[in-house]
Image (cartoon, rainbow, N blue to C red):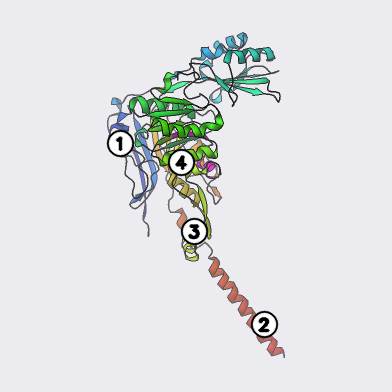
C-alpha cells in the first residue's frame, strides 16, 4: 500500500542555496541545480504538500534552502518604461491634453475612440474608466489618427515604430474605421523574478491568463534575460509586433533576442517551423497560441529539442483540457476502457479519461493577477484533474516590498483567485470542490487533509456485485412463486 505523509514547513531562505530535486523515471526535470543563485531577493517558501513515499508530488520543484540573514538580500523593484508621449501624438489634441495631465496616467491601460461616443480612458486595477471629454468622437478624428498610425495589418492591428504600443481598429461592413483601441505598451523589468528559478531549467513554459493580465510583458522580459544574462539563442515569433514593437528594428526591451515578423496571422505556425529550420534557436518565444496548426507546430518544435515559451488565453488549466483545439499543449485527452478488475480496484467506471501523451509544455503558469501566479507540473496536474483529484501546485505571490513568496498548496480555485469561502467545479468527472485554505496577509498554516479520500472506501458501489445480487434475488423470487403455485394445485 502506498504510504502518504504530510509536510508543513515555513522557511526563510536565501536564493543562493536553492537546489532542485531530481524526478524519478521519465518525469521531466523542472528546475536546474543552483538556478536561484542569480536572484538577488528574499524568497519565503511556505509548503503545504502531499508526498507519496519515494515519489514526491511536487509541482515545479522541491526547494531546499538554508536560512540566512534577510538583511543581506537586495530588493529588486519593478522598472516601467512606457514612452506614452509617442502614442499621445496620435490622439486628438484635447484628448491628448486630458491624458497628459491625468492623475492616474501611470496606470493607463488603453484609450478607446468610438464613432459617436465620448473618448474613454481605461485604467489598470480598480480605477475603472473615465470619459475624457463630453463631445463624441467624429469620423475626421478617426481618419486623422489612422493616418498618423499608418497601415493596419490583416488582424486590424498597427503599431508606432520604435514603441510597444498597439493600435487596433474596428471596421464596419464596408471596411471603414468606426472605432480604435489605443493600448499602452510598457517595458517592465522585474516581473521575471516570479519565475527566475525556472528559466535555466530548459523546460518549455506556457503562460495562461485573461487578456490584459501581463502575459506579453512577461515573455518580453524573459526574452531579454534568456538572451543577455543566460546567453541563449532566442528567436521571437512576433505576429502582431506586440513583443518587439513596430518597425524593422526591434525594441531594446527584448535584449539580444532575434525577432521574426509574421506577414499574416494565419501563417504564424509556418514561421515557427521556419525559425527552427533556418536559424538554429535554442529557445522560441511565441505569443497567443490559438489554433490547432499552431499547437501542432509547438509539438513539432518541442520534439526537436527546442525550448518553447508561449502564451494562450484562458484562466485555468482545465480550460486547456476541455479545449479540443489546444488540448495537445497539455498532452491531449483520450478515453480508455478499463477491465472489470482494474475498474473495481480503482473504484471508478470502466470508461475513464486519461492523458494521451507527454505535454508539449511541461510547466504551465496561471496568471490570475500581475502579482499572483499558480505554477503547475502539467503531467501530474492533468492526471490528477482527470482522476477527480486536486493537484499540488505552487502559489507564487509578490508583496508590496517586491519579495516573492512561494507556497506549496493543494490546488483549489479560491486559493488561485484569492477569494475565501467559494467553491468551484474542478476535474473532468465534475463535482464541487470545497475550499481548502484561505490567503491571508500572514503565512497560511492551514493543512489540507490528504486522507479525505479514504472515507469513501467501501462506499463505491460494485456494479458486478450488484448485478449478481439482483440476479440472485430474481431467481429466489421466481422459485418462491413456483412453489406457491404448486401448493395451490
Residue 155: x and y in percent read 59, 27
Q: Nearer the viewer, mark 1 or mark 2?
A: 1
- SS state under label 3: helix
Q: Could you tell me if the residues under marks 1 and 4 are in contact, i.e. CB atoms within 8 Å?
A: no
Q: Nearer the viewer, mark 3 or mark 2?
A: 2
- SS state under label 4: helix
Q: Earlier in the sequence, mark 3 or mark 1?
A: 1
Q: Nearer the viewer, mark 3 or mark 1?
A: 1
In the image, is 83 to the left or to the right of 141?
Answer: left
Residue tagged 2: 481
Q: Inspect this view and state whether residue 14 appears.
A: no
Q: Is residue 316 magenta?
A: yes
Question: Residue at point 43% right, 54% down?
Answer: 451
- Location of the N terminus by quadrant is bottom left
Instruction: Give the quarter of the image for residue 443.
Output: top left
Q: Earlier in the sequence, mark 1 or mark 4?
A: 1
Segment colored magenta: 309-323
Is residue 344 positioned above or below 174 on the image?
below
Q: Earlier in the sequence, mark 3 or mark 2?
A: 3
Query: From mark 1 to mark 4, how far is it between C-alphas?
Result: 31 Å
Residue tagged 1: 18
Q: Could you tell me if the residues under marks 2 and 4 are in contact, i.e. CB atoms within 8 Å?
A: no
Tag 3: Cα neighbours inside 10 Å, few (<14), some, or many (≥20)?
Answer: few
Residue tagged 3: 456
Question: Residue at point 61% right, 79% down?
Answer: 476
Q: Could you tell me if the residues under marks 3 and 4 are in contact, i.e. CB atoms within 8 Å?
A: no
> Number of numbered discs present?
4
Q: Earlier in the sequence, mark 3 or mark 4?
A: 4
- Location of the C terminus by quadrant is bottom right
Tag shown at residue 299: 4
Amino acid at each position: 500500500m502506498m504510504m502518504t505523509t504530510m509536510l508543513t514547513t515555513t522557511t526563510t531562505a536565501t536564493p543562493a542555496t536553492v537546489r532542485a530535486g531530481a524526478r524519478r523515471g521519465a518525469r521531466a526535470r523542472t528546475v536546474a541545480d543552483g538556478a536561484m543563485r542569480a536572484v538577488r531577493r528574499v524568497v519565503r517558501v511556505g509548503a503545504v504538500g502531499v508526498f507519496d513515499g519515494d515519489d514526491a508530488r511536487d509541482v515545479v520543484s522541491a526547494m531546499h534552502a538554508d536560512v540566512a540573514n534577510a538583511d543581506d538580500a537586495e530588493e529588486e523593484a519593478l522598472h516601467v518604461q512606457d514612452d506614452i508621449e509617442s502614442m499621445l501624438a496620435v490622439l486628438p489634441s484635447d484628448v491628448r491634453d486630458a491624458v497628459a495631465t491625468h492623475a492616474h496616467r501611470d496606470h493607463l491601460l488603453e484609450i478607446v475612440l468610438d464613432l459617436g461616443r465620448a473618448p474613454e480612458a481605461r485604467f489598470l486595477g480598480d480605477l475603472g474608466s473615465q470619459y475624457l471629454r463630453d463631445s463624441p468622437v467624429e469620423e475626421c478624428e478617426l481618419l486623422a489618427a489612422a493616418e498618423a498610425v499608418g497601415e493596419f495589418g490583416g488582424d486590424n492591428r498597427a503599431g508606432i515604430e520604435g514603441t510597444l504600443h498597439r493600435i487596433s481598429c474596428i471596421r464596419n461592413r464596408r471596411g471603414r474605421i468606426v472605432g480604435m483601441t489605443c493600448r499602452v505598451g510598457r517595458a517592465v523589468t522585474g516581473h521575471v523574478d516570479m519565475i527566475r528559478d525556472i528559466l535555466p531549467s530548459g523546460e518549455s513554459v506556457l503562460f495562461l491568463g485573461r487578456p490584459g493580465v501581463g502575459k506579453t510583458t512577461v515573455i518580453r522580459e524573459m526574452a531579454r534575460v534568456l538572451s543577455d544574462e543566460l546567453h541563449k539563442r532566442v528567436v521571437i515569433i512576433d505576429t502582431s509586433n506586440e513583443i518587439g514593437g513596430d518597425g524593422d528594428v526591434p525594441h531594446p526591451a527584448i535584449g539580444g533576442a532575434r525577432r521574426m515578423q509574421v506577414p499574416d496571422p494565419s501563417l504564424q505556425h509556418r514561421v515557427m517551423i521556419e525559425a527552427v529550420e533556418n536559424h538554429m534557436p535554442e529557445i522560441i518565444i511565441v505569443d497567443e497560441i490559438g489554433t490547432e496548426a499552431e499547437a501542432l507546430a509547438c509539438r513539432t518544435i518541442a520534439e526537436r529539442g527546442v525550448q518553447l515559451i508561449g502564451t494562450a488565453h484562458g484562466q485555468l488549466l482545465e480550460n486547456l483540457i476541455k479545449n479540443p483545439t489546444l488540448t495537445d499543449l497539455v498532452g491531449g485527452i483520450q478515453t480508455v476502457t478499463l477491465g472489470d478488475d482494474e475498474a473495481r480496484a480503482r473504484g471508478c467506471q470502466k470508461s475513464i479519461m486519461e492523458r494521451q501523451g507527454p505535454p508539449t509544455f511541461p510547466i504551465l503558469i496561471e496568471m490570475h493577477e500581475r502579482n499572483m501566479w499558480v505554477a503547475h507540473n502539467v503531467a501530474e496536474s492533468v492526471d490528477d484533474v482527470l482522476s477527480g483529484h486536486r493537484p499540488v501546485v505552487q502559489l507564487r505571490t509578490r508583496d508590496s516590498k517586491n519579495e516573492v513568496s512561494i507556497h506549496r498548496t493543494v490546488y483549489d480555485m479560491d486559493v488561485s483567485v484569492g477569494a475565501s469561502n467559494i467553491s468551484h467545479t474542478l476535474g473532468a468527472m465534475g463535482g464541487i470542490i470545497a475550499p481548502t485554505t484561505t490567503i491571508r496577509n500572514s503565512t497560511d498554516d492551514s493543512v489540507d487533509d490528504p486522507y479525505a479520500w479514504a472515507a469513501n472506501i467501501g462506499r463505491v458501489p460494485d456494479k458486478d456485485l450488484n448485478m449478481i445480487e439482483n440476479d440472485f434475488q430474481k431467481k429466489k423470487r421466481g422459485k418462491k412463486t413456483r412453489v406457491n403455485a404448486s401448493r395451490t394445485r
